[in-house]
Amino acid sequence: MRGVDVSIFNESVDWAALKAAGIEFAICRTGYGKSGFDENFQRNVDEAHKAGLICGAYHYSYALTPSDAAAEAAFCKGIIERAGVMLELPVWFSMTDADEYKARHGFEFTRNHVTNICKAFLDNIAPLNCGIYSNLSWLEDYIDWQSLGCRVWSAQYNSEDNFKGYMWQYTDALQIGGQTFGGNILYDKNAQPQAVQGVAAPVEPTAPASPQSVIQNILANARENASSTATSTTSTPSTPAKPPTAAPSGIQGILANARENAKKSAPESTEDKIKNILSAVRKNK
C-alpha cells in the first residue's frame, strides 16, 4: 500500500491527484515539541478522507528527557481530540534529530536514554494507537524498539528496505502533480489497526467465563424457565404466554434432568443443585 506524509510545508495538496496516482494513505503531522501546532493537520485529514485515503498522524519530537516526551504526548493527544478526526492508522512519535536541535542542547545520545524517551511518549499517548518513527541508524544504535513492543515506521532513502517494519519511508522527494512528498510503503494491506477518534479507548478482549459464572448462568436460566412455565398456566388466550428463554446447546437437557430429579426427591440445597448440574454436564459431554 503506497502513501505519503504531509505537513504545513505541503501547501494546497491536490488530493485527487494523489489518489489518481495510486496513493492510498496519508500520515499527517499534528505538530512538533510541546507547543508547535501544525495548522493544516485537521484540513489534511479531512481532505484526504474525502479523496478516499485512510489516515494516520505523526508528531515531531524535540524531547530531551522522558518528562519532555510525556508533555509532548499530552499536547499531541489534545490536538487530535480537538480536531475530532478519525485515524485508521497509528499516531507516530518521530524520534530523530533532523535539524540537530538535540545535538545543540546537550542531548544524551545513548540507547537507554532514547528508548526511555520513546517509552514515555507511548505510555502517555495511550489509549491512542501509537508507533515509533525513526531512521535506520537510530533504530539500530539508539532505540531498543523490541523492548517497546510497538509498530515501527523506518526511514531509509534507498531502493531496498533493510529494516522491514510496519511501514517504510523510502524517499522524501516523491513527485506527484508537481508537488513533493515523503513516499511510504505500508506492508500489510490487510492490517486494520484500531481506529481512534479523539481519545477513544481501544476495545479490550473479553475474558473467558469462569466456572462459577457458568453455574450462575445455568441457575438463572432455570429460574427464568420456571417463571415462564408458571406464567403460561395463568395466561388468557388473548395474551400469549412469553416463550421460555432458549438455553445454550446441552443446557436444556441438563435443566430437564434437574426438573425430573426435583419431582422424585425432596428439595435440594443450593450446593446439591450445583453438584447435580455439574454431574449432568459431565454426562452430556
Image (spheres, rainbow, N blue to C red):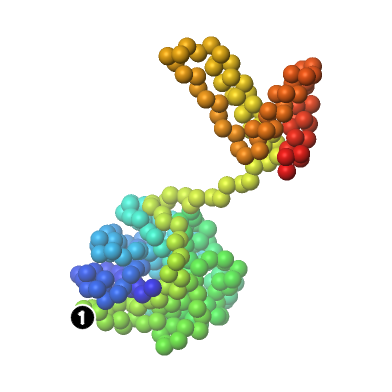
Question: Where on the picture, by quarter, is residue 246?
Answer: top right
Q: Is residue 126 left or right of residue 13?
A: right
Q: Give the residue drawn at x 39%, y 66%.
A: 58
Q: In which quarter of the image is the N terminus?
A: bottom left
Q: In which quarter of the image is the C terminus?
A: top right
Q: Give the residue drawn at x 51%, y 80%.
A: 163
Residue 174 is situated, as x and y percent measured from the top left of the image, at 30, 81
Residue 38 higher or lower than 203, as above or below: below
Q: In this view, does 71 lie to the left or right of 149?
A: left
Query: How many discs mark residues in the rendered view?
Result: 1
> 247 or 70: which is nearer to us?
247
> 64 or 281: which is nearer to us?
281
Q: Give the amino acid at mark 1.
A: Gly
Is disc 1 placed on a helix, strand or loop?
loop
Q: Give the residue drawn at x 41%, y 54%.
A: 196
Question: Where on the picture, by quarter, is residue 180?
Answer: bottom left
Residue 71 is situated, as x and y percent measured from the top left of the image, at 45, 58
Say whether residue 276 is visible: yes
Q: Give the residue drawn at x 56%, y 80%.
A: 141
Residue 147 is situated, as x and y percent measured from the top left of the image, at 60, 68
Mark 1 highlights which residue?
Answer: 178
Say whether residue 33 is visible: no
Q: Is residue 5 left or right of residue 63?
A: left
